[in-house]
Structures are given as C-alpha cells and as structure tokens.
Amino acid sequence: MDIADLKRRACEAIDAEAEALLSLSHRIHDHPETAFNEVQASTWLTEFLEQRGFAVTRGLGSLPTAFRATAGEGAPRVAVCAEYDALPGIGHGCGHNIIATTAAGAGVGVRAVIGDLAGSVHVVGCPAEEVYGGKAIMIREGAFDGLDAAIMTHPGTRDAVIAKALACAELKVEYFGREAHAAAQPERGVNALEALIIAFNSINALRQHIRRTARVHGIITDGGQAPNIVPGYAAGSFLVRAEDDDYLQELKAKVAACFEAGATATGARLQLTWNPNEYCAMQTNMTVAARHRENLRALGREVPDDERPQPLGSTDMGNVSKVVPAIHPAIAIAPPDVNGHSPEFARYAASDSGDRAVLDGAKALAMTAIDILADPDLRAAMRAEFERERAPQPPPAASS
C-alpha cells in the first residue's frame, strides 16, 4: 500500500471541493447559531456529506442537531469531529465554522481513497461545545463507542498539535433573600445581592491559594430590580477550571464554600446547580499528534518538535480523549495578539487566512486519518499509549 499516494489523492479530492467547502464555511459563519440550536448548520453539513456519498444519520440520541456521516465499513474506525455552535453576541468568535468544514473536507478526502483502505471514516457532528458539553452527552449515549481514534482541528493563532485544555465545571448560583424598603425598613430585608458580593470577595481571597493554572470566573446575571428595594433574589453564572480532573473536584468544594459564606453572612438561602456535563482535561495522544505534525509540515506549516502547549481554555474534546485516543490540534488563522472569543477573531474566521485553514486543516486531518486506517503498528502504539495514560498512577513516595 502506497500511503503517500493515498494522501496525495485525498488532498486532490479536497482541492476539487475547495469552492464548495469555503462556501459552506462562510454560510455557517454568516448564520451563527448557539448551543443546541444549530439547525441550519447541521442541515447544511449533512446535505453536503450526503450528496458526496456518505451514509448520514441525522440526530444522535437526545441531540437532534448531532449527526454521523459514514464512508467505508467496519473497523478500524476513525471519527473526525465537527463543531458548529456559535457564541452568544459574538458569532463564530471561536471559528467553529472552520472546525465544521475541516471535518467535512477531511471526510471527503478520506472517502476518495476508502476503497483502498480497511475500515471506515465517520464525520461526527457535535453540537453545544461552547458551554454545555455536548460531547459529554454524546459519550453517555454511545456516540463514541467502537471508535479507534477521534481527531479534529481548531483555529487559533499558531499551528500546534498538542492541546492543553483545562477541566471545567459550570455552576449556576442563586440566593433567595427577602425584599424590603431599602430606606424605611432595611432591617426587615435579607439582601441576596450582598450574599453574592461576599461570595465574589471570598473567591478573590481563594485565588491566591489555588494552583497557578486553575481559574474561577463568573458574572452576576441578576442583581435586583431597583435601588430602593433590598434585593430578594440574586443569581450568577461561574466556571471553575483546573489542569487535571482530580483537582477540579477539590477546587469545586472550595468554591462552593465561598458561596456558602455569603449565605451564612446574610441569612439568604443558597442554591448551587452544577452542570452535569463537566469538561475533562485534554489527554493528547502523542503518537497520533506526531503523525499530524508531519502532515501539517507536508503542507508547509511549521510546528516545532519541542512545541510548548499553551492553555486552550476548555473543550469537551477532553471528554472524548478519555474514552478513545484523540487529538485536538490548532491551525493558525490570526496573529498572536488577536484574542479568541472576540469579534476580531470572528472576522478572521471568514478571512483569506481562515479559508486557507479550512483547506489545510481538512488535508492534514485526512492524511492523519489515512495514517491511522492504513498502519496497524500506529494503531497499536496509539492504543498502548492510551491505556498507559488511563492506568491508575501510583501514589508519590513518602519523603523521609
């Protein structure tokens, strides 16, 4: 089997679809849809893939905007993950239009040569990555069962193959107090907003005593109705992040104590609601990442061997990496001084550099999928690495 020839043919198939892929990317970009509402994007992607010979299943489990598009049959099975939800108020400030179309393009590339390979390629449409952890739901409902690997690429400010994504838990906080006239009868009130402010200050005090890589940040979503009424209700939304899954659980307990302090100090009743779809820390499969680095270099992109991963925020691809060997590389579309999750980054997601990333990203993913499908030694090595990472770690030796 001539793997180099298979990769060349896959890239040619992607080039033949360049106009359609870029049109699809811009169409998704121009019609942003937030988590679980990605009806148009899901429809456009599945139509694109179905028209090119994929067997498409629309709706997976409880998620109507999730999908699976398959070419080939049986094992080995490689999934290419597509994300297509947008950010409220910003649109595609994370470039999910690029993630979606690189996945679709990679699928088209692999399908062009799947007859010469064992196994199958699956373009898996994954809704609600930004906040709600759609892939966590999909994992529970079996969407990633039976896969040998899962790959995707994310637009960013540099080319990279190693993702450092933090574990993350989302928290909704509510305080229930008692309204009263703020001037005439303040002693009859229980100030829910003050409880939330005390909690904010407690979290600020906590920050100097947590690990440098951990993060706690949030906003007040309801702080009262009028300045002359003691706020009887206050609410906030918070994210708690940590570099590893175990420390996230430890940090969650400390953050919860900060909110309990607000309730104790004011007498307001506290209700904490943790999102059950927590994001796991990303576990990059270095065996697959090394092949992806080679494939990016073959396209003229520079990724150093001694790459130092930078924090990515959080992604539910971390959850996928705990159930199947996975990578979450980045492909540059913007200069290093451009902030992610910003209107400026959203503009780059529909720029000439964004379009180049669609085609290069699709080719690199297709070539990596071909490596996995064609090379049983690679599959054995990536699986062995995955199992080593999953094995329980021995406790540190006691110091004398």
Image (spheres, rainbow, N blue to C red):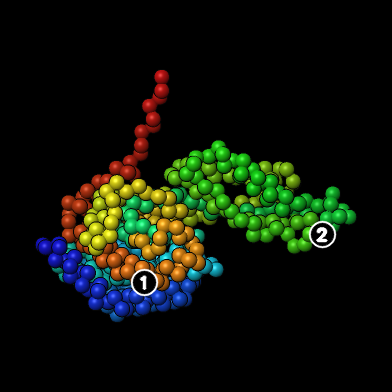
In the figure, residue 201 lies in which quadrant?
Answer: top right
Q: Nearer the viewer, mark 1 or mark 2?
A: 1
Q: Residue at x 17, y 63 (%)?
A: 118
Q: Residues within 10 Å of mark 1 (few under 14, many from 20)?
A: few
The answer to whether residue 97 of the structure is visible from this angle is no
| Numbered badge on residue 84 | none
Q: Residue at point 22% right, 69% down?
A: 11
- Relative placement, left or right, of 198 versus 354 is right
Q: Where 244 falls versus 303 (above or below)?
A: above
Q: How far across and how far down the image is residue 72, in percent?
A: 22, 69
Which residue position holds label 1? 352
Which corner quadrant holds the N terminus? bottom left
Q: Position of residue 163 (x, y in %)?
A: 37, 52
Amino acid at dot 2: Asn
Give the Cα distance between marks 1 and 2: 53 Å
The local crowd at label 2, few if under 14, some if 14 to 19, many if 20 or more residues have their Cα within 10 Å, is: some
Query: Circle 1 sits in a helix, a strand or a loop, which is it?
Result: helix
In this picture, residue 323 sits left or right of residue 76: right
Instruction: Indicate the quadrant containing the C terminus: top left, top right, bottom left or bottom right.
Output: top left
Element type at mark 2: loop
Q: Residue at x 36, y 33 (%)?
A: 394
Which of the labelled discs sits on residue 228, or is there none? 2
Q: Nearer the viewer, residue 331 or 145?
A: 331
Corner quadrant of residue 261: top right
Q: Is residue 166 visible?
A: yes
Q: Quadrant of residue 121?
A: bottom left
- Residue at image position (49%, 69%) is 91
**Residue type highlighted by circle 1:** Asp
Residue that lies at the very extreme toward the right in this rendered image: 184
